Amino acid sequence: MSELTRTADVVLVGAGIMSATLAALLKKLEPDWSITVIERLDAVGAESSSPWNNAGTGHAGLCEMNYTPAGPGGTIDVTKAVLINEQFQVTRQFWAYAVENGMLTDVRGVLNPVPHVSFVHGADRVDYLRRRHDALAGNPLFSGSELIDDPDEFARRLPFMAAKRDFSEPVALNWAPDGTDVDFGALSRQLIGYCVRNGTTALFGHEVRDLRRQPEGSWILTVGNRRSGQKYTLKARFVFVGAGGDALLLLQKSGIKEIRGFAGFPIGGRFLRSDNPALTTAHRAKVYGVPSPGAPPLGALHLDLRFVYGKPWLMFGPYPGWSPKFLKQGHFSDLARSLRRDNLLSLLGVGVTELTLLNYLIGQLRLSAPDRIGVLREFAPSATDSDWELTLAGQRVQVIRRDKHKGGVVEFNTTLVGAADGSIAGLLGGSPGASTAVPIMFEVLQSCFGHRYQSWLPALKEMVPSLGTNLSEEPALYDEVRSWTTKVLQLDSP
């Protein structure tokens, strides 16, 4: 077929939670703009945003102990936990606004109230958890958390984890009752659905094969239909690359200088899962443990109650896996195709400086099925092999940034990379990712549309009333927005 040419004000590559959030924001801010979403798969949120491909935790720093490292003299650094909680409060406010304005129509299909819990055993770790609790207790964002070190109360809260447990070793929990479980796939579908109903074009089974910047600053994208083989060019004033692991490859194709030196290392994940009603009834929480020595921050083991398509499941993991693919449904050549002269030193430098991480990954890859159940029994001693099956989760591409001293350093955050003229931006990395999609997209709006951002502020503050304010420093405002979002998002009862 002959090559077609189309135009759009905005092109969003990928139909996961990041593109869905940005599309919804822009549709509200500039309803007359033409927006096109391009997705290589046949559905919204089918890769990293799929509920089977991520932890589904509404990350708010409530239970993830890697966000609160111990410092000298017994101190606990809570800076990152507070920052992530602040970001999640922004996300919650936008979701509540989206419900009130008909953008989200099935709240319970997206969000479920599930306590977030930190779990430790051993005297030293119990002491750490107590100091962590004390360090966060004075912050209004964490004031509802409880420290539980009584075995009877442990058994009442988490009967599945208490069964057959030897309580002669000290154990403790930090219990945050106001946590959430999020189906980011369902959330993405609802947001994209709203946008399509209001004029956005969504192309499924299509992939971007090349990007070229034009002299006047616009972009020409070469797009192919994966089913028919038809291809066409698409001209856009602004491009956002929210393509998960593929974002690195596409930004490299764009040729922007800002992507130079960035590399990526794919890390897969596997979870044990169970839908046994006896277990899902006996474990009504997301419970995070202490990261193993050498494990990346996203590698902390957790035993979670999940709701997938409305059905409760227990998931335990992650057990790291490895593949050279940058997406679960990617290509085995992805890693090789990402190698450039400008990022080889970054990748090699990490190979030297992160030997502990590499050894951890190798050790995890060697785990047998009985080994994995053995790890699960550290959380739930009564776990039975026959109740659990192994499932493959999504691929994460760990961001590696060039460093003049080390050659390259691994980053465990979500990293926004964009051209200086604001015509293109993309997102690299993973956790806490989806949970902080709204503040990250606000950053995209401010950095890429600086000439319009001030005029958008009244509308943005209607979406997020606390915008520009640290809620941890404004307890009264926090109580007000928390009460509003809890009611609208139906998070006040399980």
Image: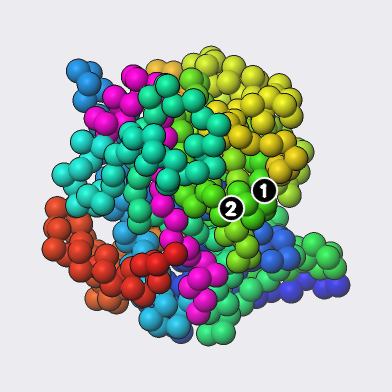
Q: Which residue carries the number 2 mark?
A: 280
Q: Position of residue 92 (x, y in %)?
A: 36, 64
Question: Residue 7 has which mark?
Answer: none
Describe the element under mark 2 as helix, strand or loop: helix
Q: Is residue 136 left or right of residue 421?
A: left
Q: Which residue is mark 1?
A: 274
User: In front of the other: label 2 or label 1?
Assistant: 2
Q: Considering only vertical position in the picture, is 103 above or below 392? A: below
Q: Note whether 458 is above or below 160 in the view shown.
A: below
x, y percent for residue 376:
60, 33
Instruction: Assign the N terminus to one quadrant of the image.
Output: bottom right
Of the residues shown, which amino acid type is indicated by label 1? Answer: Ser
- Pick the residue in front: 359 or 251: 359
Q: What residue range appears in magenta?
A: 105-132
Residue, x 40% and y 71% (percent of image)?
489
| CB atoms of marks 2 and 1 within 8 Å | yes
| 486 left or right of 17 in image | left
Give the amino acid at mark 2: Thr
Label 2 and label 1: CA atoms lie apart by: 8 Å
Quarter residue 448 falls in:
bottom left
Residue positioned 37% across, 62% down in the render: 91
Q: Is residue 255 visible?
A: no
Report the residue that reaches farthest toward the front.
152
Q: Inspect the magenta stretch and tell me whether residue 451 lies in it.
A: no
